[in-house]
Amino acid sequence: MHLASRCLAAGAGFSLLAPHQTWLQAAVPVIAVCAVRSGAGKSPVSRAVAALLRAAGRRPVVVRHPMPYGDLQRAVQRFALLSDLDRYNCTIEEREEYEPHLAEGTVVYAGVDYAHILAEAQTEADILVWDGGNNDLPFYRPDLLLVVADPLRAGHELAYHPGETCLRMADAVLINKVDAATPEQVAVVEANIREANPAAVVLRAASPVTVDRPDVLQGKNVLVVEDGPTTTHGGLGTGAGYRAALQHGATPVDPRPWAAGSIALTYEAHPHLGPVLPAMGYSTEQRAELRATIDATPCDLVVVATPIDLQTLLGFPRPAVQVTYPVQTLGAPTLSDLLRPFTGG
């Protein structure tokens, strides 16, 4: 919008289309999960929504917001098996979003032609889950718009476009990570929700970090690999991996002196980054540079906080532990309560 201000001052006019003018109407119900910032925890919420729908006997299919890093000629991509990730030559970021859904048995659609995607996806689903990207708007008219807010960046819910639009349109807002935020941060987010969208249902959720082998971390020097978008354009200096390392008595090693190629450029472009390694892998070359950085950084083991098995994907030989961070709603209402109109429970 700073660029928009410059355009207006120079005399150039333009228009912004409202979501109601652009989104498509599905033949089945749509639950859209969006966020006010990248890295708020939207993906775990989307997976939790899909799991609750399956448990209620529904047939959810996930439609993922576009991730245009590869072949933009692919109008429709359907992911049902992990091998489909290789078939479509997915980037690390795409794998982070698709693979956890596939592991839970949920079919995922993506691509660039969202009318075509809708036509195909709704033939095998009785409900669609729109899994939003960053803080963008849904492409399909939602019957329920659930927006995730992050109190670790309290105030950002009213400071970024189009995340603020998502917040103001939301039927429900889930304040995530209340276990990691201070009460004051949570209170700021709650006050902003009440001001911007007083009719919205407000849920609270924790996002506890879990390590598959926590006993091996105590006293170790570790390289923390975080989700890329969360720590780059999402603006968080560290993420779940860093928090898990500190909780279990490990000391994170700063990888910047050993950053290779485009990984070093990533640190230059995002000076807010802390002593963690963002999982950048938008090309074969960048994956190689990511692995080279991991191999070169002196550490006892690697703490992997991406939602995928990065060790197997990259083939690095260092010992590693995996961090997960599922969403857990606290108090009432719960996600189950919110979804009752769709589950019949």
Image (cartoon, rainbow, N blue to C red):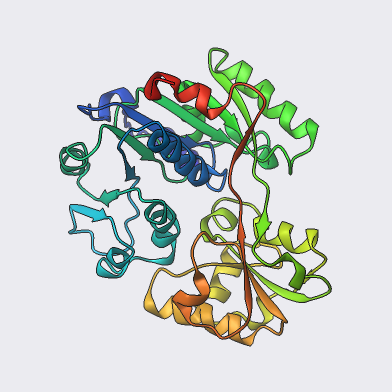
Q: Is residue 30 above or below residue 82?
A: above
Rendered location of residue 185, percent (x, y): 75, 34
Instruction: Compare residues 342 and 130 and report the one nearer the observer.
Output: 342
Rendered location of residue 23, percent (x, y): 27, 30
56 sits left or right of 26 in the view: right
Rendered location of residue 338, percent (x, y): 49, 23
170 sits left or right of 153 in the view: left
Instruction: Compare residues 80 and 34 and report the one nearer the observer.
Output: 80
5 sits left or right of 249 in the view: left
From where the camera sits, is residue 239 visible? no
Image quadrant where residue 14 sits: top left
Q: Is residue 273 above or below residue 149?
A: below
Q: Is residue 281 above or below residue 113?
A: below
From where the camera sits, is residue 48 visible? yes
**What residue do we see at 51% from left, 59% from top?**
307
Query: Which corner quadrant holds the C terminus?
Result: top left
Rendered location of residue 105, percent (x, y): 36, 51
| Total numbered labels | 0
The residue most toward the top is 199
**What residue do we see at 64% from left, 44% from top?**
207
Image quadrant where residue 72 sits: bottom left
**What residue do we see at 54% from left, 35% from top?**
148
Instruction: Compare residues 278 and 118 and report the one nearer the observer.
Output: 118
**What residue do we see at 42% from left, 36% from top?**
55
Image quadrant where residue 252 sits: bottom right
